[in-house]
Image (cartoon, grey):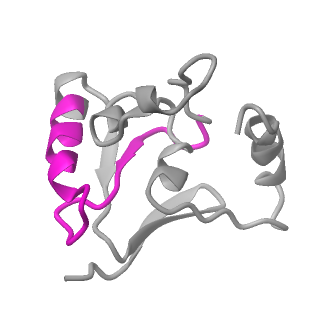
């Protein structure tokens, strides 16, 4: 997002009602203020980059733990992510597969249904 410039473009685009952003897994996590914690489920150091980016876009004021207690290969790692958030007093929300967070006109709500 940084290399393409989407990190600066997206916040401006979302100020209008002309765009809906949908992010799955890490695509949702990038909206958070920080990407720390979620690194416990991924291995960011394995992706060649000039520098690891720990800052999220800050479009929401909480972090997301996706695949929480779901039938997904990364689900067990989410327990460590949630523990990290709790230990570091980071505001967070868990999402089971099949759930989403909808933010519309400043109102945040959980939508969808968890999948088994």
Image quadrant in which you'd find residue 19: bottom right
| Quarter occupied by the C terminus | bottom left
Identify whether 90 is placed above or below 109.
above
| Residue visible at 24% across and 61% down in the picture | 73
| Quarter occupied by the N terminus | top right
Question: Front-most of 76 and 36?
Answer: 76
Identify whether 54 is placed above or below 77.
above
- Image position of 101 (left or right of 22): left
Question: Front-most of 65 and 76?
Answer: 76
- Image position of 55 (left or right of 92): right
Identify whether 13 is placed above or below 6.
below
Question: Front-most of 56 and 49?
Answer: 49
Which residues lie in the magenta part?
A: 58-84
Extreme residue toward the top, this view? 51
Image quadrant in which you'd find residue 7: top right
| Residue visible at 51% across and 33% down in the picture | 47
Q: Position of residue 35 (x, y in %)?
A: 45, 32
Q: Position of residue 38 (x, y in %)?
A: 35, 38
| Residue visible at 25% across and 67% down in the picture | 72
In the image, residue 116 lies in the stretch drawn in magenta: no
Q: Position of residue 44 (x, y in %)?
A: 43, 32
């Amino acid at each position: 997002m940084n290399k393409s410039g989407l990190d600066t473009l997206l916040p401006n685009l979302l100020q209008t009602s002309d765009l809906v952003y949908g992010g799955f897994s890490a695509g949702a996590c990038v909206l958070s203020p920080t990407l720390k914690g979620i690194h416990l489920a991924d291995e960011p150091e394995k992706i060649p980059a000039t520098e690891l980016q720990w800052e999220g876009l800050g479009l929401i004021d909480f972090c997301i733990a996706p695949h929480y207690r779901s039938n997904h290969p990364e689900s067990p790692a989410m327990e460590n992510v949630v523990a990290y958030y709790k230990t570091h007093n980071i505001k967070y929300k868990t999402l089971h597969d099949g759930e989403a967070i909808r933010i519309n006109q400043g109102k945040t709500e959980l939508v969808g249904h968890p999948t088994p």
